[in-house]
Amino acid sequence: MKKHIFFFCAAAAVLGLFSCSKTAKAPEAVEAVPDGAITVRIGIDEASTKVAYNTTDFKDFQINQVQIFVFDAQGKLETDYFSSVLPSNSTSVTLATFTGDKTVYAVANHPREFMAKDYLLADFEEKMLSDLSENGATNLVMSGKNVISVSAYNPTGATGSEPQVLPIYLKHLASLVVLDKITVNFNRTSLTNASFEVKEIYLKNVVGKCRLGMDGNTSTAQGPSLPYTLTDAQYSNADNWYNKITKQTSPTPPAVTYDACNISCSNVSGGTGNVMNRCLVAYPNPTEDGTDSHADSFNPRHTRLVIKAHVTKTGVITPAEGIDTYYVFDLPKMAPNNIYQIANITITMLGKDNDDKDDDLQQGRIKPTITVDPWTSTTQLNYEF
């Protein structure tokens, strides 16, 4: 009988311990809920840019999709937001955040990025790159950022009942190269009255990557902040360049780097020239003047504009159907969100037989004239060949 009593007492003790343990278990932590809200207003300042070039099929201020990245005071990704929008030059999105200091990025016309929670702002600004192929005539990649201190949001009360508004002005990652006009003047040469047709215009030695990060806030129109240039390692990596030394055939280079235009230049006797109005796009090239840009093996070098033309002249040019000839022009150091507007190229002779090499045939004969005038700025160039 004593054994039975001991058994029941022990069982009761075990049940008592189990009951106490269950009762004493700490309650599960309640996950924090975002208590702030912001409306990000995204726009592009168009002032003083409409006169820079005249083309109808190039919409450099069009926003097609936007992604917002919110980083907290510790520089960690807190949340993001992605949306396609009706094509326009401005848009706004509202999203929930926690309260506190934030750095907010807006990136337009770039494929959606999926990043882990707490992804570092420093890594975003250094390592997140756009490829030039992501750009199109109506889809230029743009970026901007601003900072805000988010306070509590109360949608049901009079105080704090509206999301805080944060303006962000976008900057183009790209440099825009515009060719306004070509003047062909074969007067007093054996090519007088020759036929001259521009078959293709393209860029070579094109930087193909650009950082999404900004070197400062873009809270106001025409502010000085621009996308970061590539790090030295990124710039020196040949894989980050397109059309090295010549236009590549495989894989096909980004469409924004070439234009198969087939424009017949009816005026080959100078005069007012032949209107082109062609736009090409490259990512910024920080190559400094004086850098060797003509070695047979590729090294980082100046971006160049190439005009491929077809010239015919009976009794002067053989074969009778004419020949292709190439004109190559150095572009200066190229910055993001800048226009390099070539007001005119004057051609008085045949160019190179091919564009297989990056040799220097222009030294002492070509003198760019450079004038600054915003996108952020427009660099005007004039060439003679």
Image (spheres, grey):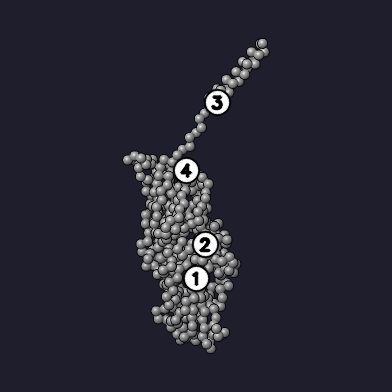
- Pick the front one: 87 or 240: 87
Quarter occupied by the N terminus: top right
Residues under numbered marks 2 and 3 in contact, where contact means CB atoms less than 8 Å apart? no
Residue 293 position in % (x across, y down):
54, 67
Residue matched to label 4: 74
For marks 4 and 3 on the same chain, the one whose residue lies earlier in the sequence: 3
Determine whether the residue tagged by mark 1 lies in a helix, strand or loop: strand
Q: Nearer the viewer, mark 4 or mark 3?
A: 3
Horizontally, is 321 left or right of 93 in the view?
right
Determine whether the residue tagged by mark 4 lies in a helix, strand or loop: loop
Kindly identify the residue that appears in the image at 39 percent across and 48 percent down: 39
Name the residue type under label 4: Gln
For marks 3 and 1 on the same chain, the one whose residue lies earlier in the sequence: 3
Residues under numbered marks 2 and 1 in contact, where contact means CB atoms less than 8 Å apart? no
Label 1 crowd (10 A; few <14 / some 14-19 / many >=20): some
For marks 1 and 4 on the same chain, the one whose residue lies earlier in the sequence: 4
Q: Nearer the viewer, mark 3 or mark 1?
A: 3
Q: Which mark is residue 259?
A: 1
Name the residue type under label 3: Lys
In space, the residues marked 1 and 4 are separated at their CA atoms by: 46 Å
Residue matched to label 2: 133
Is residue 380 visible to us here? no
In space, the residues marked 3 and 1 are separated at their CA atoms by: 74 Å
In space, the residues marked 2 and 3 are separated at their CA atoms by: 60 Å
Horizontally, is 92 left or right of 119 in the view?
left
Q: Which mark is residue 22?
A: 3
Residue 64 position in % (x across, y down):
44, 58
Q: Residue furthest bottom?
A: 315
Is residue 262 visible to us here? yes
